[in-house]
Image: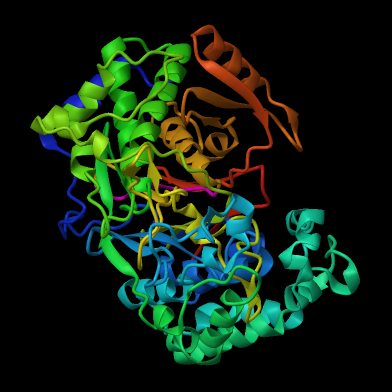
Amino acid sequence: MRHSLLAFVAAAALAACAGPPDVSEPGAQGGKAWRLSGRAMVSAADKRAVEAALNAMKAGGSAVDAAIAAHAVLGLVEPQSSGLGGGGYMVVYDRKSNTTVAFDGRETAPATATADYFTVNGQNLGYLQAVYSGKSVGVPSAVALYKAAHEKFGKLPWGPQFDAAIKLADEGFVVTPRLANSLGARFQSGPLGTNPASGAYFFPNGKALAVGDRRTNPEYAATLRSVAKDGPAAFYSGAIAQNIVAAVHGGDVKGDLSLKDLADYKVLAKPAVCGPFQEYRICSAPPASSGGVAMNQIMSLYDAIVAKNDDTTDDTLLRDFVLAQQLGYADRDHYVADPDAVTVPVADLLNPAYIKARADSGFDPGDMPEPGDPGAVLHGKPIRDQWGRDANTAQPGTTHMSFVDFEGNAVSFTATVEGPFGSSRWANGFVLNNQLTDFTRPPTLNGKPIANAPGPGKRPRSSMSPTIVLDSAGDVFMVTGSPGGNSIVGYVAKTLVAVLDWGKTAQEASSLPNIVARGQVVRVETSDSTAGPNPIGKAWATTLSGLGFKVQEVSGEVSGLNLIVARKDKFEGGADPRREGVAIEVVK
């Protein structure tokens, strides 16, 4: 399964001597040509989105231009997962400047939100009550995210990126099995079906859209035309914004989102959180995303546990990966939140001394994982008990896209409306998110505040983990990510360990059974709702049970992994067989 221990030791020694490339330092490429120059690849959840992205690159666009084109299409053909009414995180690697930047397009709470935002008439809203209330809707941020990334890394003029989606919306797109199967009875009887506008769109004449139906969306096309012509101003003010606010303020439980909240929204551009793994460097989005902390911590813990145990058989490597996941999830759940509202100890959580302490803590299979205390380990000042424990759940209404363009630039883009069809509230041809239910409810536990409680203008913690891996030369090696709610952390970590350490191809990594080790119970995918029993998953479940883990065998995991691996002389694409995605390469 793993490359030899000798190779691991050699790589670790090389990293210790030379150190990984500093992605914040321009010019580390030394003017060398990109080894796969003239070739590009896109992996996304729908072939039509992939084709729109490839056409954007063939027209001279960058990976960012391609990402905008792809997501505009996905918002139309895959509205249950993401769209203009939601947001996301985009991590961009720019080869010329040798920088990796994360664009935080996370939705924000209204300026009037308080810690008890989901308490109505003295009662904390139940989950579904909260989802379908106006209070669940954060400022839709996808359009602002497009513009922020385009201004820094786009090559095409603003506007053509939306052409493919506009054409599909005008002429009609063919409904796929995944969209049709998403339109179950609970959605028809709920707000999605009973709202006159969304009901007529998804359930024409009282019947759900079926596989093969052709669906036009003139409202969506008009929205995109306005955005293409006038930029984000067309979205965050005027009629489009007024329609969004009206949708939020309707219904039994109204939200507080205002026109000023929309006008004040800002995308945050920050350096990606990067860390070493053997000869590679893993870069992902900073908090309030989980990616930068969780991916780096899990992989560093994995390496530390493997090295401590000095055993590289398949069974022990699987064990060590699960242990690393459990410890990483516990820290992520406890500490990661909006860094503009609370202090997130990112550097301490990734500090090698803290990683070693966590790996040496005596945590064994079957134990209940608890958050560590980097303050106590590194500074002699405990910080763990300033927050109540948090294991908030999140629903999988998300998509992921991976891009590498002809010049070796890369984008990892995870976008979402939160739950399936978001809040089910409809405006301007798209559904609005229910992102604010990612805040923890209630906001305190045992009298202590929770880091991820609601707050004015605050961004809820996200499990989204768009990730780019750089090789020892500082070039892109891998682009990965997934939808899947809080299980995203486990899904994406699986692809990292499979490709970087177990020698798997991109497609093999995406197809491997999912293991999600959040808490004491380890969820192992032993069958698939379409493919049936999975012998690898069954063998893993048996192995982990025998090692002492508390294992739950599951079916129907909702990952949607889309990844690209840039080998020395070729691209490998991986598209999750659990969804409808594809990975396609194009040669200039």
Which residue is drawn at the image coordinates 72% and 66% (left, top)?
191
Q: Quadrant of residue 12?
A: top left
Residue 41 in view, yes or no: no
Q: Residue shown at 55%/61% (left/top)?
A: 434
In x, y percent, where is residue 77? Answer: 68, 66
Q: Is residue 481 magenta?
A: yes
Quadrant assignment, res 445: top left
What sort of colour scheme is used for the picture?
A: rainbow
| The magenta segment | 474-483
* Residue at the spot 17% in from the left edge and 49% down from the top edge: 22
**Residue 443 spot, x, y in % from top left:** 40, 49
Q: Is residue 268 above or below residue 561?
A: below
Q: Quadrant of residue 264?
A: bottom left
Residue 83 seen in the current view: yes
Q: Is residue 18 above or below residue 339?
A: above
- Magenta-colored stretch includes residue 366: no
User: Relative to residue 46, is residue 508 drawn left or right?
Assistant: left
- Give 587 or 441, whichever is nearer the viewer: 441
Q: Position of residue 397 (x, y in %)?
A: 59, 55
- Image coordinates of residue 124 in percent, x first then y, are 53, 53
| Residue that lies at the very extreme toward the top in this rendered image | 546
* Count of labels in the image: 0
Residue that protrudes farthest toward the front in the picture: 122
